[in-house]
Image: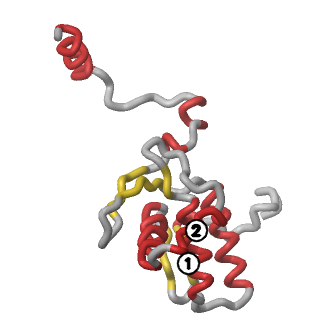
């Protein structure tokens, strides 16, 4: 009992902020926002996290490819491709480890209720601050700021 009380007293004076070093900064998922999401009209909840920078770049490449093909309004098949991709980048366990190894694996959700797929996909987009724009398609704060060709050095841009 004394040990529990002592730990509680120590916790009152513990710093609420951690000063991160290289190890903590490179830990990845520990720094991503994560939340338990209650799926509407179901009795299930899932952990979801925001996308990594690598995922945001992959998402930008996908939307750029759609735009380059002149896609203004997506088809249901394209919606499923987009949603399963962002779901694979976002649905995780309580520790932030992704549940789906690839977008292909997440496509198994297409056998389920379409609304479940869309709810999870839309939540993944919201968590990562991605918005749908009728004029420009899907975009994000990050993607909006990535106008330059990332394959060129900053000296060339």
Q: Specify few, some or many for label 1: CA neighbours under 10 Å numbering under 14, 14-19, or 20 or more.
A: many
Q: What residue lies at 73% left-to-right and 84% top-to-bottom?
A: 68
Residue 57 image point, x, y percent = 66, 62
Place residue 53 in its image quadrant: bottom right
Disc 1 on helix, strand or loop?
Answer: strand
Of residues 25 and 98, the one drawn nearer to the viewer in this rendering: 98
The answer to whether residue 12 is above or below residue 28 is: above
Which residue has dot 2 on it?
108
Q: What residue lies at 21% left-to-right and 15% top-to-bottom?
A: 4
Of residues 19 and 45, the one drawn nearer to the viewer in this rendering: 45
Residue 136 image point, x, y percent = 58, 84
Which residue has dot 1 on it?
138
Using residue 106 as the reference point, say whether residue 9 is left or right of it: left
Q: Are marks 2 and 1 in contact (CB under 8 Å)?
A: no
Q: CA distance from mark 2 to mark 1?
A: 23 Å
Of residues 110 and 136, the one drawn nearer to the viewer in this rendering: 110
Q: What residue lies at 17% left-to-right and 11% top-to-bottom?
A: 1
């Amino acid at each position: 009992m004394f040990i529990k009380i002592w730990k509680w007293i120590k916790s009152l004076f513990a710093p609420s902020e951690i000063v991160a070093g290289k190890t903590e900064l490179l830990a990845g998922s520990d720094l991503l926002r994560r939340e338990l999401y209650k799926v509407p009209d179901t009795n299930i909840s899932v952990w979801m996290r925001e996308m990594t920078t690598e995922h945001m770049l992959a998402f930008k490449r996908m939307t750029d490819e759609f735009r380059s093909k002149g896609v203004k309004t997506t088809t249901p098949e394209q919606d499923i491709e987009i949603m399963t991709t962002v779901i694979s980048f976002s649905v995780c366990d309580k520790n932030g480890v992704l549940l789906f190894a690839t977008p292909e694996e997440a496509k198994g959700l297409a056998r389920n209720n379409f609304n479940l797929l869309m709810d999870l996909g839309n939540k993944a987009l919201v968590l990562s601050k991605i918005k749908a724009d009728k004029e420009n398609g899907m975009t994000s704060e990050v993607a909006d700021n990535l106008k330059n060709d990332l394959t060129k050095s900053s000296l060339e841009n």
